[in-house]
Image (cartoon, rainbow, N blue to C red):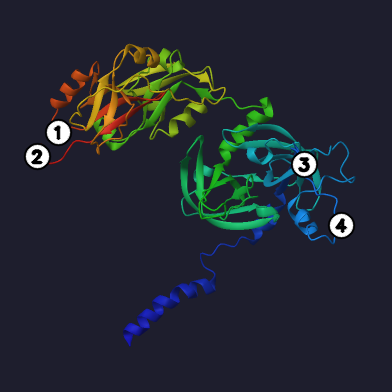
Amino acid sequence: MARAVFFCLMLCAPFALLAQGRDLPDFTELAERQGPTVVNISTTQMRERRGSPQVPNIEEDDPLYDFFRRFIPRPPGPGQGPGQSPRELESRSLGSGFIISTDGYILTNAHVVDAADEITVRLTDKREFKARVIGADRRTDLALIKIEAAGLPAVRMGDPNRLRVGEWVVAIGSPFGFDSTVTAGIVSAKGRSLPQENFVPFIQTDVAINPGNSGGPLFNMRGEVVGINSQIYSRTGGFMGLSFAIPIDVAMDVQNQLRQFGRVSRGRIGVVIQEVSKELADSFGLARPAGALVNAVEKGGPAEKAGVETGDIILKFDGKSVSSSSELPRIVGNTKPGSRASVEVWRKGVTREVTVTVGELLEDRVAGRSERRGRPTEQAANRLGFAVADLTAEQKRDLKLGAGVIVEEVQNNRRADVRAGDVITAVTSRGKTTEVRSSEQFNRFLTQLERSTTLTLHVRRGESNLFVTVKGESGPG
């Protein structure tokens, strides 16, 4: 009997708390006060009609009439707007935004207004305004637009750094065109890095975000904007519990530059980096995985001029610690071009400090891939499970390398991501780096190592440089 009473108390306690309203957030006041600051954004883009088929002149009672009416578009009729030719179509998109000043400045996502010929902003009181783009930044997916109005309700800014994982947050927007839709959830994580998104430490939430929410605000429970809803992770195109917002401090810095200059200026130092794994940290003699490993230095760039070398691990930049490689682009990008910054690097077992004059990031660079040249030669697999050959003079010239060996065939290699066509230029083991000059020297070097030794290969793959860790074998050799 006592056990039954105990279980009843355990089961009933949560419902008693729910009945009393404890720990349950109330979003009504937030929605009422902040709803008018959120706007619906629709855009129109004119596109040329490319010779589409037309409905033939047939009677409505003809059996084929319904087929042509449903599947073949009709040409625009005489009711088309002024200036719109029969060869133009309107493409409309929907998004959200929010008012940041009473005189009509609005923040939204760049992809919401990208390539738009006309932007219409609709307020919650149903008033509509034509908007103009002040500036857009594709790297952060932010845009600042302006409508000619006064006395508008504006949002209050919050501090995303004070957000805690598990904290309640609220989104207001126009998913699928449904104005003033309120959804709520919690902060799932902070400082998320997404592929191809190096300049934004995203706030991850489980707030329901769908097409049309893009550009809308993310509020904390104090009614302050802490982020801009920008992306979702989805395999279906709909909400799956993973939403990402741009922190408002990042957005406000971008909009300040857009308002003043119409563009965003970012720093760059000219390095290609990768994450420092535990195996790489052990190989380079670093106490713990941290920093950004430099696997290529741009010739003539700011980093090379400062003395940064391939294989350096950047631990600090301008006094700011670099915990992971994803943090470095944001730190460098936020540094004013032309300024001088100290860089602390880990090199050959010791820390060194160099000073770099930060350059300006002007445009995205897209790396191509070079073709593998030369014929494979018969080579036996080495102890790592792949066969290597010396580089030909033509390959050295094309790759701009003085030495190295090319991987001709991967026969039995389960310990490292080495591929046919990779060029190995150096090997690092126990903090010491050895340049690879020939296949004979490389294979002889491997035979001298204990099988339990973990080493790092310096690899040229296409036009990219990377470090590949090869784990040592366990057990008897």
Q: Residue at x 64, y 37 (%)?
A: 110
Mark 1 is surrounded, within 10 Å at the Cα level, by few (under 14), some (14 to 19) or many (20 or more) other residues, namely some
Q: Nearer the viewer, residue 474 or 26?
A: 474
The earlier-in-sequence mark between 1 and 3 is 3
The earlier-in-sequence mark between 4 and 2 is 4
Q: Which residue is mark 3?
A: 89
Q: Residue at x 56, y 62 (%)?
A: 25
- Give x and y (percent) for residue 23: 51, 64
Please, is residue 302 above or below residue 74 in the view? above
Q: CA distance from mark 3 to mark 2?
A: 72 Å
Say if mark 1 contacts mark 3, CB within 8 Å: no
Say which element carries label 1. loop
Please, is residue 221 above or below residue 110 in the view? below
Mark 2 is surrounded, within 10 Å at the Cα level, by few (under 14), some (14 to 19) or many (20 or more) other residues, namely few
Q: CA distance from mark 4 to mark 2?
A: 88 Å
Q: Which residue is mark 4?
A: 59
Residue 103 appears in view: no
Q: CA distance from mark 3 to mark 4?
A: 27 Å
Q: CA distance from mark 1 to mark 2?
A: 8 Å
Q: Which residue is mark 2?
A: 476
Q: Which quadrant would the N terminus be assigned to in this image?
A: bottom left
